[in-house]
Image (cartoon, grey):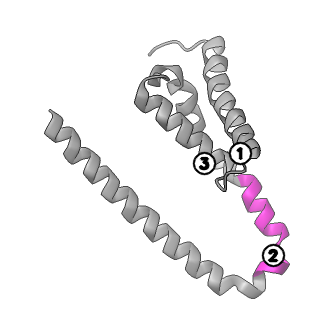
């Protein structure tokens, strides 16, 4: 297994955080109706697709973040628990929206993966 140095991880994290900071700044300056985090993902995707950012430049820290993704949901869960008085009267609409959006995300993700696989097979 390849050894990953702390400086390499810090550099990779710096790239991701730099893109995030820049996207928040861009969103504030331009007033775009897109959240800075989403804008950052779009900028990162464009950077990866154009080759401006190589996958090796962010791969290890990205894998680390994905491996520990569950910890990023703790603040949201605590926020929901502290807002239970507000939510308890609207639980059914929230449940319906949650189920519908989950199904939509699953379907769109599945269709996207299938389309990318077909495209990859055509190019081979």
Q: Position of residue 110 (x, y in %)?
A: 34, 58
Ranked by sequence position, the earlier of labels 2 and 3 is 3
Rendered view: 36 above or below 84? above
Q: Which mark is residue 30?
A: 1
Q: In the image, which is nearer the foreground, mark 2 or mark 3?
A: 3
Q: Position of residue 82 (x, y in %)?
A: 85, 68
Magenta region, residue range: 74-87
Q: In the image, which is nearer the foreground, mark 1 or mark 3?
A: 1
Rendering quarter of residue 50: top left
Secondary structure state at the residue bearing disc 1: helix
**Left or right: where 56 falls relative to 93:** left
Confirm whether residue 1 shows in the render. yes
Residue at the spot 72% in from the left edge and 41% down from the top edge: 24
Q: Nearer the viewer, residue 31 or 86?
A: 31
Q: CA distance from mark 1 to mark 3?
A: 15 Å
Ranked by sequence position, the earlier of labels 1 and 3 is 1
**Left or right: where 118 falls relative to 4:** left
- Looking at the figure, which quarter contains the C terminus? top left
Residue at the spot 24% in from the left edge and 45% down from the top edge: 117
Q: Mark 2 — residue?
A: 84
Secondary structure state at the residue bearing disc 2: helix
Q: Are marks 2 and 3 in contact (CB under 8 Å)?
A: no
Q: Mark 3 — residue?
A: 38
Q: Nearer the viewer, residue 9 or 109?
A: 109
Q: Residues within 10 Å of mark 3 (few under 14, many from 20)?
A: few
Q: Are marks 2 and 1 in contact (CB under 8 Å)?
A: no
Q: Position of residue 13 (x, y in %)?
A: 65, 25
120 magenta-colored: no
**Left or right: where 11 falls relative to 83:** left
Query: Principal SS element in the magenta part?
Result: helix
Q: Residues within 10 Å of mark 2 (few under 14, many from 20)?
A: few
């Amino acid at each position: 297994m390849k050894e990953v140095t702390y400086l390499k991880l810090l550099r990779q994290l710096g790239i991701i955080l730099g893109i995030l900071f820049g996207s928040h700044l861009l969103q504030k300056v331009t007033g775009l109706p897109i959240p800075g985090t989403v804008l950052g993902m779009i900028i990162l995707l464009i950077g990866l697709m154009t080759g401006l950012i190589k996958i090796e430049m962010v791969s290890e820290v990205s894998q680390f973040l994905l491996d520990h993704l569950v910890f990023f949901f703790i603040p949201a869960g605590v926020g929901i628990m502290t807002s239970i008085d507000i939510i308890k009267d609207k639980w059914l609409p929230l449940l319906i929206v949650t189920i519908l959006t989950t199904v939509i995300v699953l379907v769109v993700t599945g269709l996207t993966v299938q389309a990318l696989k077909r495209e990859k097979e055509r190019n081979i």
